[in-house]
Amino acid sequence: MAPREQWTSKIGFILAAAGSAIGLGAIWKFPYMAGTNGGSVFVLLFIISTIAIGLPILLAEFVIGRMGQADAVTAFKRLAPGSKWNLIGWLGFAFGFIVLSFYSVVGGWILSYLTRALIFKLNGLDYGLMFDSITANPIEILLSQAVFMLLTIWIVQGGIKAGIERASRWMMPLLFIFFIILAIRSLTLEGAMEGVRFLFVPDWSLLTGETFLLALGQAFFSLSVGVTGMLTYASYLPKEERLGQSAVNVSLLNIIISILAGLVIFPAVFALGQSPAEGPGLIFVVLPAIFEQIPFGNLFMIIFFILMLFATLTSSISMLEIVVSTGIRERTERRKRAAWVYGLLIFIIGIPSALSFGVLSGINVFGGTIFDFADLLTSRIGMPIGALFISIFAGFVLTKKQTIDELNTHPAIHALWKFLVRFAAPLAIAIIFVAWIIDITF
């Protein structure tokens, strides 16, 4: 059995882990959630929730992953032999399949938009009708999804150093550069400051219990915790790296990218008289119309969808890595074959989600499309359950000596983390879960 690969540097790990967290959650979902839920109030609650709740759970995954030095199933077996805790690893394996099966569909949408922007076919259109046309075209949507999955497989089959770390080292800095360019352009539009005020000046009348729950949920899911992806990445870390610093850096990068996304979108939305409460279509329907109205708009549209592709890929490779790492179970010589086999299976599983806006649109599952059901199954059920068990395991099963040795931090900081991961994080997860159950029941 070949020795387990390791990240070549701390920055390589941080960029890969941040890329896993910074995907559609930060760039697509955060702006429309902020736009429909109070703007700056939502942003403030999101930041607080990320630091107080998301960060402790992220650090818990890091601790378990590096202690186990293996895929999630094997890690839990090593740390709690003879128990059933390894089922958390299998849960992550199963939901990694499902997440990527519908995530790759969105990746295909982005490729379709990027292709049209590159050949100057995103101008003078009704973007709402175009979005419906793209998602209803079975040939285009399946082809785009397949290309996106091929890109993901190609990166993951290269391994940690040659594949994931190398890709993240290129994509994450470019993502930041592109975001800054777009934010500067958006902020220089006439009337842009109204969007800045919407993003940063709180209107406390918009503070509600629902806003808090939604911000808490956004913070939780945007960090990509609960499906053992961060656990898997941490298993490739050498023992000398400080986990606390890495977790803080990843959380801060996630907050910064989310706010940058807001600075790209909201100043332009307000400057051009659009509504910030457009909802999920904010990026695919509103933004192309905005770019069309500014000088060099097609160029900025191309940059934006390249950025979206990078962000989506950095998350998709972490999902496939969960599946591949668990599937090969330390047999690294099987990585390439496993990446292709699992990747193709995920593509096949994702076909119903891809077609759920067209030929399968008549199929209703619990009040939504097949795509909606896959999203619900993972983001509202799988991830909270996984994160809850990870918190309990790190808080109550791992001993104080184990976690102190692994974190190598000040006793007071360790005590605070232990309290948060034992009590605050599980309580927050339970509140989100119960609130959702009540919402769908009544």
Image (spheres, rainbow, N blue to C red):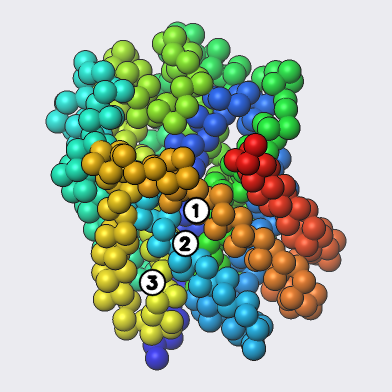
Marks 3, 2: nearer the viewer: 2
Q: Quadrant of the N terminus?
A: bottom left
**Contact flag, marks 3 and 2 (Cβ < 8 Å):** no
**Contact flag, marks 3 and 1 (Cβ < 8 Å):** no
Q: Nearer the viewer, residue 57 or 439?
A: 439
Q: Which mark is residue 377?
A: 1
Spot occupied by residue 438 in the image (x, y as percentages of width and height): 67, 42
At x 27% / y 53%, what residue is drawn?
351
Spot occupied by residue 215 in the image (x, y as percentages of width and height): 64, 37
Dot 3 or dot 2, earlier in sequence: 2
Q: CA distance from mark 1 to mark 2?
A: 8 Å
Say if 91 sits above or below 198 in the image.
below
Q: Quadrant of the C terminus?
A: top right
Dot 1 or dot 2, earlier in sequence: 2
At x 36% / y 39%, what residue is drawn?
307
At x 74% / y 60%, what residue is drawn?
421
Residue 334 visible (yes or no): yes
Q: Amino acid type of disc 3?
A: Val
Say if 164 sits above or below 130 in the image.
below
Neighbor class of circle 2 (other Cα within 10 Å; few <14, some 14-19, many 20+) is many
**Contact flag, marks 1 and 2 (Cβ < 8 Å):** yes
Q: Nearer the viewer, residue 378 or 277?
A: 378
Judged from this view, the residue extending furthest toward the bottom is 1
Spot occupied by residue 225 in the image (x, y as percentages of width and height): 57, 57
At x 61% / y 17%, what residue is drawn?
197
Q: Which mark is residue 95?
A: 2
Q: Secondary structure at mark 1?
A: helix
Q: Is residue 150 left or right of residue 331?
A: left
Which residue corresponds to mark 3?
A: 324
Q: CA distance from mark 3 to mark 2?
A: 13 Å
Marks 1, 2: nearer the viewer: 1
